[in-house]
Amino acid sequence: MKRLTRYNRKIRVCFIQSAIMICLLWIFFIPNFQKVNIGENDRYTVELNGVNVGVVADESTAKACLRTARRQLAAGNDELVLATGDLKVTGEQVLVGRVSSENDITRNMLKVLKQNVKSTLNRSYTVKIKDFSVNLASKEDVLALLKASLDQYDTKHQYDVSLVLDPEREVNALTTSVVSNEEEKKEKARETAFPEAGIESLISDVMAKVEPLTTEKNFSDFELGLQSLDFGDKVEIVESYLPEDELTDRNTAIDEVTKDKETNQIYEVKSGDTLSTIAQAYELSVKDLIAMNPTLENENSIIRIGDELTVTVPEPELTVLHTEQKYYEEDYEADVQYVDNDSWYTNKSVVRQKPSAGHRKVVALVSYSNDSQISADIQKEEITYQAVPKIVERGTIVPPTYIKPISGGRITSGFGRRKAPTRGASTFHKGVDWSTPVGTAVMASSSGTVIRAGWGSGYGYCVYIAHADGRETRYGHLSRILVRAGQKVEQGDKIALSGNTGVSTGAHLHFEILVNGTQVNPLNYLN
């Protein structure tokens, strides 16, 4: 009996130990086993880029582990890291199946991703100026580039540039703000100062309304040097991620933006301009200027006031506008004085007084676009000796114009010497002949008074018209005359019909223009 009791006790101890062992196995192993769902996949093998990384209970766990692995790959890195991650999840049915822990799967995935890094995109900043753009690695590089453009004209470093949000853009784009260091100090002082109150505030308001006494400044009272500075072009800066081979180093970018490049511009011809003076002003040869402008045939081509010519101007990518207060002494010309003469034509003028240069001392606000002067606003001027102006007397009457007296027609004989003329005709042709059918309308070339209308020796039926500028026009070989002597006609009025009268070999119109009683080439006077 005692022996049986001892045996029972031993059985109870073994049972307790077995129960404890089963509990431990349950705690450590059962969570990694999946419940059996009859007819459904209950375990999934996970592969990343063809490498087995573990087993999960559902597909969502695999995707979550991949997201975690990608975050760990990019953690602690300012750059955007791209890695190939081809996830494949294969399901199967099992009665009892062990799954991997999420930590193990994530660790395995991270290892595979590191082995398949495709590229690293660096955080960068794209600077755009008109059609030009450059990619830089940091904001510091962007600011260095912009400061280098300003420092060409700000040798004392009076101005600074910062990046601010562009209010004109919906996306988070940056633009520039150029502020003088002095103004920035004053603004900070105003922000930190205690606000005025009571009687102090009242006194300040009164003093602000009091206009300061205006006294003449001496030259020494002006503060010379740089007065304002800003960019003349809109600068846009956008943050992006780019491969390293698309980034430009700081020094190269500065050189690209600040170095002068030849740019075509339009120049409007002014009074006194010649091809050589325009070419010299833009450091071109006359040959190069002609090559850039198809309207110019050679160095003798005529240019007129208001004509537009293409010229090449060296300019940097980024324009800097700056204003400087300068003192200088110079010789100067007085403005030309005109005396109008209402009895002269506008093409007549006479110099009544020759000019003489004066000399002056000047303080002026001079505005520049890069190195090109835009304007000069004189602040103070002291004349050493006065300039003598040029005085010109000029006409105010617009001179008459001349038009071709017929529509159409073909020139059969031009002005000047000719061979084998019709018998009875001169070897020197004093006008222009247009072949045209008999009965073609002939118009007055310009307004005037008919001084002859009838038969003329050699001319056949003809019309002579005197014009207000002293010139005369003649129309010959007419078939019919429609005006009479003494009649006033306007430009374009019908005065006759063309014909084949007088010394003529066929139906045509003979037309002459006389200046001071002498025939000239009419083609040089027709509009």
Image: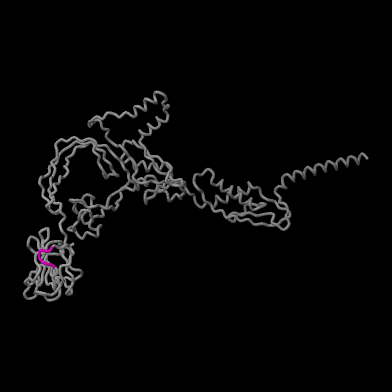
The region drawn magenta spans: 483-487
Say which residue appears at 39% left-offset and 45% top-offset.
250
The quarter of the image holding the N terminus is: top right
On the picture, is 41 further left or further right than 485? right
Between 4 and 321, the one lying in front of the other is 321
The quarter of the image holding the C terminus is: bottom left
Say which residue appears at 77% left-offset and 44% top-offset.
21
Q: Position of residue 506 (x, y in %)?
A: 14, 76
User: Which residue extends farthest top?
Assistant: 199
Residue 282 sits inside the magenta stretch: no
Between 190 and 322, the one lying in front of the other is 190
Q: Position of residue 386 (x, y in %)?
A: 14, 38
Residue 486 sits inside the magenta stretch: yes
Say which residue appears at 10% left-offset and 59% top-offset.
470
Q: Position of residue 339 (x, y in %)?
A: 13, 47
Q: Position of residue 375 (x, y in %)?
A: 26, 43
On the picture, is 398 further left or further right than 427? right
Q: Is residue 415 something that shows in the picture?
A: no
